[in-house]
Amino acid sequence: MRRRHFRIVLLLSASLLAGCAVGPDYQSPNISVTSRFLLDMALAAARAAQARASLRRADAALLPSANVSVQGARAYQSVETLLGQVLNSTPGFDRSGSYYEANLGASWEIDVFGGLRRGQEAARAEYQASEAGAVATRLAVAAQTADVYVTVRGLQARISIARQQAETRRQLLSTVMLQYEKGIAAELQVRQAEGSLAQVEAQIPVLETGLEAAMNALEVLLGVQPGTYRGELGLAAPVPIAPGLAETGTPAEMIRRRPDLIVAERRLAATSARIGVAISEYYPKFSLGALLGSATAVSSGNLFTSGANQAQGVLGLRWRLFDFGRVDAQIAAARGREAEALAAYRLAVLRATEEVENAFSALVKREAQVGILTRGESSLARARENSLAAYKGGVVSLIEVLNADGNLLQIRDEKAQAQTEVARAAVFSFRALGGGWDASSNSSSALQ
């Protein structure tokens, strides 16, 4: 009968152990259409959360740890074993026995040579690197969004110029048609005016296609379905004007706030601290342990009585005295990772310097181009007016008017493109400086 009960208990225990597992059950994520658009920022946030947990673990390693253990046991001694035969020969031997124990234990590794503190330093640097990486991702997304927005406004400006020019050529065609009907103008002039109008009108669908694609790209970056903000984006607005560049300090000070450089520098700091962790393995590790509890083999009612009390104190020593070859290899590997991180940091500095130089150069040159095109536009506008007046007076042919009209359209379109590139260069400068500049106070704020 007792064996049957034992089998039932064993089967129930196995069923419970097989059917239960701690932690959440995995479920495949439900991916919406727009969820992938913010995937980079989600990854950066997840990395920061992992690094934060690692830092907490490193902090906890410096503190004492404690645990509580409670157990109760019921045993039935076999009389077929040597021990059972000896005990069975004892008068009054009971094959059934119980054991109860409750303990509070504590342990603490004394960080005599600083290995744990170096580990904490490395974990903190890695956490700071992950935080800077998240900032870099947000900065990249913001810069890309601003760039696409500027492109949208630039295409709208070019479309507006093309439509205005098309309307101007329609009016010219109407004038030529009236002259043709009165016998003043030849049919050749009518066809020339019609062809010139068609050339301008043919540019508009191409620009509108680019505008549609830019609007879709902007809405995708904002994490919404294309067409969501079409009402707001469809209202034409001027190309944003870039703020004037102020004195921002030395080149080193300008690029120091870049989050990608902070990532590289903090990773270098982490690898340097890991060398200290590896070197600490040369030295002995000391630990303190203590236990305070109660144990009884009589009955649970005797637990926590004076006779059942127990205590223990332990001074531990662990020293890899005959394992220095492996420690040497670990230190060499740590120094190699530091050298790699240093090379990566230097390369990041060079690339950052290149980006800053290119961005500032493009901004200055594009601003100069806008100034030149503005002056040229003014001159060609007057030339177009003069040619039209001369044509109406019979002094010049229609070809001169169309040429002046085409030159004016071209320079206005080039000016709109240059203004767009100025704003884009300002966005690139903003990103190259790690978040922009303070144009009012002539000072740069470091990344926090």
Image (cartoon, rainbow, N blue to C red):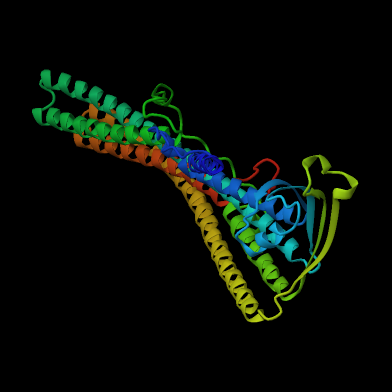
Residue drawn 18% across the image and 24% down it: 176
Residue drawn 20% across the image and 24% down it: 173
Name the foreground residue: 347 vs 362. 347
Name the foreground residue: 128 vs 95. 95
| x and y percentages locating residue 105 in the rendered image | 78, 52
Query: Could you say which quadrant of the image residue 177 lies in?
Result: top left
- Lateral position of residue 111 relative to residue 361, left or right: right
Please indicate, yes or no, whether residue 45 appears anywhere in the rendered image: yes
Name the foreground residue: 73 vs 386. 73
| x and y percentages locating residue 43 in the rendered image | 51, 45
Residue drawn 79% across the image and 53% down it: 106
Residue drawn 82% across the image and 49% down it: 293
Please indicate, yes or no, whether residue 375 appears anywhere in the rendered image: no
175 is higher (above) or lower (below) than 152: above
137 is higher (above) or lower (below) than 358: above
- Lateral position of residue 132 relative to residue 163, left or right: right
